Structures are given as structure tokens and as C-alpha cells.
Image (cartoon, rainbow, N blue to C red):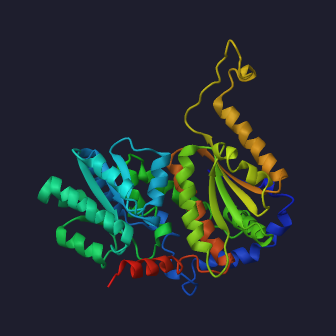
Amino acid sequence: MLNLDLAKLAPYVTQDQLNAMADELAAAHNKLYDPSAPGSDFTGWVRLPEAYDKEEFARIQKAAAKIREDSDVLVVIGIGGSYLGARAALEVFPSDGPEICFVGCSLSPNETKQVMDKVQGKRWSINVISKSGGTTEPAIAFRLFRQLLEQQYGAEANSRIYATTDKARGALKSLADHNGWESFVIPDEVGGRYSVLTAVGLLPIAVGGTDISQLMAGAADAMNRYDQRSMDNPVWQYVAARNLLYRQGKKVEIFCNYEPSYSFVGEWLKQLFGESEGKDGKGIFPASAQFTTDLHSLGQYIQDGERMLMETVLYVDDTGCDLEVPYSDDNGDNLNYLTGKPLSFVREMAFQGTLAAHHDGGVPAMVLRMPHMDAHTLGELFYFFELSCGVSGHVLQVNPFNQPGVEAYKKNMFALLGRP
């Protein structure tokens, strides 16, 4: 079970201030169930951990087992919400089966060519993920990798392409139907950045060997735990704290962690909150940092720079292994006082020391502690932040489920490319 610690908010936010937001939070939370609220067509994720399509879930597991059996590499093609959640999970739990490569999330010829070279002479498959099939970055990548797959496998290539797309329409759905590719559904009522617990995330995660049943169970436990309308709800506490800090001028939220494999969870959070809240001239800017590594680069700014920052720390108590600091005969580094200490203890002291220093330097912090690194806990984490983001967007009085600004760069790019 996740544990939210708000001890390092005082004196910036008090319990009385948190309690005073109860009515505001109740109204925002209720909007997730209100068909007249902004973005109500995209709230299918709220009950998804229990209301998911069990038949499709079984097909996902079967397809994952096939890919693990017949492929050395799975190339996942997608961008934004079509890859960030899966990649976050696969960084936390690296694949124990096929190597999983992500393309279509940039326009880099170098990155794309490296993956093309990697699959040469190997058994491989494609999972292309796109609601429409027309998003530029993944569509170009899919052209390249589909051609490569067909050159290697001929007609058999169609049995190695898995399309995750709209259930009834769009360019990718038409191609999948025409060519007989196995396809999975991106639900109409679930937007990309909330889609990690759909086939979008579940298929690549399952190919990697993670138990997706446990992932969904963790999300379901979180759904039930956080479906309460009171300040005892950790989601309400977190949403209230970050919005109260925002109103005090804390405009940037740094998501930081002490476990490098969680760095892509930070990337997932940046999209989740950035696209959901950053509109109408409002929103907390989401950033991410990897501690203790970034304490030797960003640490100076966090400690002494402009006081516009708040921190949300993701901390894993038990990472599943540990090491002891060894004794050294010469003690040239003067670290023999740590002899026999677990590395996890040193990490914990670094975390506590950093937390105190940043707080004293004017950076209020919220800490979300995870007991273990396992699929159940990761499912809880995904749902905690999805619900927090949905409620927080309504507190800000923006639509948390649209992204009107995303299209601006595309218009300019298409004009420059000469798109008819």
C-alpha cells in the first residue's frame, strides 16, 4: 500500500488549509462521474481496473505468450500516451524475454536506424499503437519497420504485426482489418495519457514478463481505496497540497526518485500532468529529477534558486536486493565508518538529508513511499496519479482530458512539409 507523507509541507501548508479545501475537492472529484462535466467522454479510466474487457485481456496474454515464444525483439511503435506508460513499467521491470525497443517517439534518423540494425537477422515482431494511424512520428516509423518485416518474412509478416488502435475506424484499423493483423482496442472513453492499463500498455508489459493480472489488481485496490469523499483520502490530500502551493507561487513540481529504474515513471508523469493541466494560462509545470545523481547537477538550483518549486518524491523502501559497504585496509576515502552498513541505509540517509535541506531552503515536499518494487504496487501508483490528475484538473477549472495546444506545432510542421 502506498503511503503519502506530508510532514515536509509545514509551514507552507497547514492541516487547516487542507481541510478547508474539502468542498472544492468533493466538487472536483464528483465531476469525474458527471456526464455534463468538461471531458466527461474520456473518463472511462476511472472504473477501468474492474470494468476492463476480460476477453480482450485474455487475448493480450495469449498474444504476449506467442511473441515471447517466436520473437527475440518486439518493436513498439508509438508516441506520447501510446508508449510512455509501457516504457515506464518496462524500465522498472526489464523484460526477461524478448528485447523491447521503442520507436516512433521521435523523428531521429539515428535512433530509428539503430533499431533497424538491431533486428537484422533476428526473429522479431511489431506492436504499432495509434488511435488514428496518422500521427506523423509513429506512422513514418511503422512504414519503415513494416517494410523491413515484409522483406524478411514475406506473407508471414502479417502474423507478426499487432495493432493497438480504434475499435472501428481510422487508417490503422483499416490496415489491420485488410491485412488480418491481430488488433486490440484503445477505448474511445480513455485518452492516451490515461491508457497504460489498456492494451496500449498491457501488451508490451506482458511481453516483458510482468504479471499484468497483478498490475490490474493493484490498480483495482487503489481505485477502491481512493474512492472516498473525505480528507482522509490520500489523493485529496495530495491534490489539495499541490494546488495550495501553486496558489502561493510554487509553479513547478519536481517529481524525483531515488531508484534509476523509475526515471521513466517521471517521464510518464510529465505527460500526464503537463497535457492535463497546462491550458488556459494555468497549470503546474511538471519536471523530473533522478536523485542522488541530479543533486550533483540540479541540486544547487533546487537548494538556492528561485523559490517557485515544490517536490513530490517517489521512494521505494524495498528494492528487492541490497549490498553492504566493505571494509578497506587503507581507508583512503575515510569511509570505514560505514563498514557493514547496507547501501539501502546510506540511500535512506541521503534521502532524509536531502528532504530536510530542500525544506529548509524553501522547497516544500510531499513523499509517496512504496513498500516494494512489484507489479501490484506499480498498478497502485499508476492509478493514484491518474485519479490525482483528474481531480486536480477540475480544481484548476480546466478540462483535464483535452489537449488543444498539441495541434499547434503540427499545423506549422504540415505547412512546412507541404502536406496536401
Give whichever of 367, 227 is nearer the camera.
367
Give whichever of 33, 189 is nearer the camera.
189
User: What residue lies at 63% left-to-right and 52% top-to-bottom?
Assistant: 289
The spot of residue 340 in percent (x, y) is 68, 21
The spot of residue 46 in percent (x, y) is 53, 70
User: What residue lies at 57% left-to-right and 61% top-to-bottom?
Assistant: 269
**Left or right: where does residue 200 sit relative to residue 250?**
left
Q: Is residue 65 visible?
A: no
**Left or right: where does residue 291 sit relative to residue 272?**
right
Give whichever of 53, 108 is nearer the camera.
108
Q: Residue furthest bottom?
A: 36
**Left or right: where does residue 141 sit relative to residue 210?**
left
Vertical placement of 334 versus 142: above or below? Answer: above
Q: Is residue 400 visible?
A: yes
Q: Residue furthest top?
A: 329
Vertical placement of 234 versus 335: above or below? Answer: below
The spot of residue 91 in percent (x, y) is 48, 48
User: What residue lies at 54% left-to-right and 58% top-to-bottom?
Assistant: 267
